[in-house]
Image (cartoon, grey):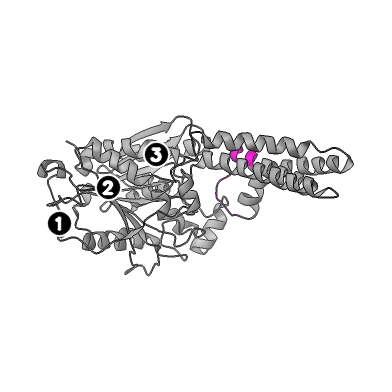
Amino acid sequence: MGVSLVDGWLPPVLLALGALGLVGLLARRGRGALVALLVAVLLAGLTYAGLNPLAVDELGLVPDPLPSSVLLWIAVAVGGLALAVGSLVGTSVGRTVLALVCGLAVLVASGSQINVYFQQFPTLGTLLTGGDPEDEQSLAGGRGAASRSMNTPVVQRWTGSATGTSSIVTAPIPGTLSGFTARPAQIYLPAAYNTPNPPLLPVLVLVAGQPGGPADWVTAGQLQQLLDGVAAAHGGLAPVTVVVDPNGADSDNTMCMDSVIAKADTYLSKDVPGWIEATLGIDSNKAHWAFGGWSFGGTCSLQMATRHPEVYPNFIDMAGEREPALSADRTQTVQEAFNGNEAAFDALVPLTLLATNRYPEVWGYFSNGSEEQQVGQWTTEVSTAARQAGMTVRTQVVPGQGHSWGVPHASLPPALDWLGQRLGIRR
């Protein structure tokens, strides 16, 4: 079901139906209708004004505020629901059915507009499958060629053509050293990898946002389409890309650190690369490896580059945060993850490491949407610190995008092109 839920004809149609539904709910007359309208306006206003303080400051459900446009559509949904419920009181069966239909139209339209912002479900098919990749295939085991560390870039040692087709497969990556239990990884294998006599390819490790998981990169992130485009632009060459899970569940947050929560850093820096080398048959020269991610994953990428530049000397930070966080309250983060030991937390955050260490061999690509002002400020701060620490840095601002999957859609291909010589996929 490839009907787009982000652009094309369906979102404006749903928006128009929602507007008609709202008109239908407002068409009722009488004292009961006036009371319902006042309650709906009150609830919508409270939602718009109070949802962020409640979710971020009081309950700590998310570390960052929701954007104003998303808050507006949530408020519209709450107001529409209140109007629909008010229309059910003391009315005829016909009016009850109409109220239910109109209320549903408002809810669907609001949900559609929220999805247009985040681009979490790009097509109707991804929505119906709950965001899980369709036709998921398990890795049938490693290929014949063993991993080897190659000094020569793949673009200089492979002259064949990519006669195979790219694929997405899944595989569990055990936490052998970390003891961490992760969800299965999603793995992109380029057409060149699936070709007879394939080359040993470079590696890209990716992490999704939080809440979220590896499958998000395949569905909302459109990973296969993006990387097929990268391969087409580089003579059939693209990195073997392993989307890993450092959290274990949608609602969990390890901050990509070793703490009392989990040994996620050990998982990402030791278990994951060890499994990739032992299983996938790739170029194990870490100079040709990169770590990337969006939102939470972007923060994680900078953490890996600053803590483990020998493993991930190239990184792609797409709309990452200033530092890892469990909530907007830094004290709560330190308390939950490090038993209140602020010095232990500070010693591991990127800005501390960038201020105390030099990274002349590390390259980093930063991007953010033009509409996400807070993230833009963080990107400026951390990219400046990275440059001052000796890193080679490139930044990109994606026009017209907030904190949505539109940022990695627009920035992952140019990031890989910029890192192409480092990874070895272009001359």
The residue sitting at 39% across, 61% down in the picture is 264
User: Residue 317 appears at what percent x and percent y?
Assistant: 38, 43
> Residue 166 in the image: x percent, y percent?
26, 48
Quarter assignment of residue 361? top left
Q: Residue at x 79, y 50 (%)?
A: 93
Image vertical order of residue 417 relative to residue 152, above or below: above
Q: Indicate the amino acid at tag 2.
A: Pro
Disc 3 marks a residue whose amino acid type is His
Q: CA distance from mark 3 to mark 1?
A: 31 Å
Q: Is residue 357 above or below residue 334?
A: above
Residue at 25% x, 52% y is 310
Q: Which residue is mark 1?
A: 148
Query: Sequence order check: which comes first, mark 3 or mark 2?
Result: 2
Question: In this view, which residue lies farthest toward the front?
Answer: 94
Q: Which mark is residue 188?
A: none
Horizontal and vertical percent position of residue 83: 76, 44
Q: Could you tell me if residue 352 is visible in this image?
A: no
For the residue pair 70 and 379, the one nearer the viewer reads as: 70
Q: What residue is shown with label 2?
A: 313
Q: Is the C-beta separation of discs 3 and 2 under 8 Å? A: no
Q: Position of residue 369 (x, y in %)?
A: 46, 35
Which sits in the foreground, 140 or 425?
A: 140
User: Which residues fall within the magenta stretch?
Assistant: 60-73
Q: Residue furthest right?
A: 31
Specify which label sits upstream in the sequence, 2 or 1: 1
Q: Which residue is the site of mark 3?
A: 409
Q: Residues within 10 Å of mark 3 (few under 14, many from 20)?
A: some
Rendered residue at 86%/44% (across/down): 32
